[in-house]
Amino acid sequence: GENVEQHPSTLSVQEGDSAVIKCTYSDSASNYFPWYKQELGKGPQLIIDIRSNVGEKKDQRIAVTLNKTAKHFSLHITETQPEDSAVYFCAASRKHTGNQFYFGTGTSLTVIP
Amino acid sequence: NAGVTQTPKFRILKIGQSMTLQCTQDMNHNYMYWYRQDPGMGLKLIYYSVGAGITDKGEVPNGYNVSRSTTEDFPLRLELAAPSQTSVYFCASSYPHPGTDSNQPQHFGDGTRLSIL
């Protein structure tokens, strides 16, 4: 099955700086890559996703890049704010599998005011 | 619109007891999932269902059972609770893109925190 690795496991940045979280995947058939944000005591919430037919997607301060050849994708958060502090998970999925997701192990992001 | 609702939010069980974690969604999603989340381990899929009457095993199904009699509900059953099942359990749902089986985002509940002592 798919194996998703995520780095770093913890990340601290100063408010206003950028944060980058990286994930690699093993299954070349994976074609859908969502990113989730999980706040304390809550379930994961989708913040951005990308499909394999594009290399980059942006939504305000959040962007995701995908390199299919190298099988890695990254989350970029610019102008970080204290409310960005949370645990972020990447995931990978491919068609015809009942929409099963394989998750990374998470990155705990702390934005220092 | 409540989304995905999980009950209870917290529960403490004794070893060997049984319980059912409830999950219901009001988005008319065909696909539903159960995950467990352990510290530093991400989310691991326990069982999933692509529609009423259809269930399938995920990565870590041992010690659990599920049923899917309606589109809305997908309960998870622990028959003989063991300390290794102490975890946070999340239910999720998604809607398959009509006609293409393109992957779609999963929508999560807020979890059930289960401790087995």
Image (cartoon, rainbow, N blue to C red):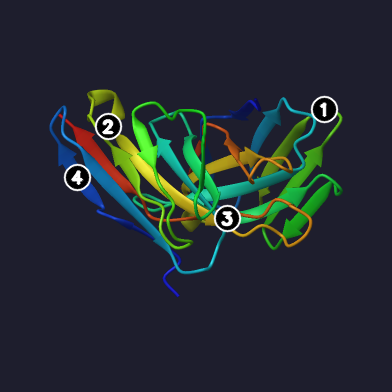
The spot of residue A1 in percent (x, y) is 65, 25
The spot of residue A110 in percent (x, y) is 47, 43
- In this rendering, do the residues under marks 2 and 1 share a single chain? no
Q: Determine which of the numbered discs, if any, sits on residue A102 in the image.
A: none
Per the model, the C-alpha gap separating discs 2 and 1 is: 37 Å
Per the model, the C-alpha gap separating discs 4 and 1 is: 43 Å
- Badge 4 element: strand
Q: Determine which of the numbered discs, if any, sits on residue B11 in the image.
A: 4
Is residue B12 or residue B41 the one in the foreground?
Answer: B12
The spot of residue A21 in percent (x, y) is 63, 38
The spot of residue B39 in percent (x, y) is 38, 31
What residue does disc 1 label?
Answer: A70
Do we see residue A113 in this rendering?
no
Image quadrant assignment for residue B2:
bottom left
Q: Determine which of the numbered discs, if any, sits on residue A46 in the image.
A: 3
Earlier along the polypeptide chain: callout 3 or callout 1? 3
Q: Which residue does the image show at 30% across and 29% down from the upper left?
A: B85
Per the model, the C-alpha gap separating discs 2 and 3 is: 26 Å
What residue does disc 2 label?
Answer: B86
Q: What amino acid is at disc 3? A: Leu
Q: What amino acid is at disc 4? A: Arg
The answer to whether residue A59 is left or right of residue A29 is left
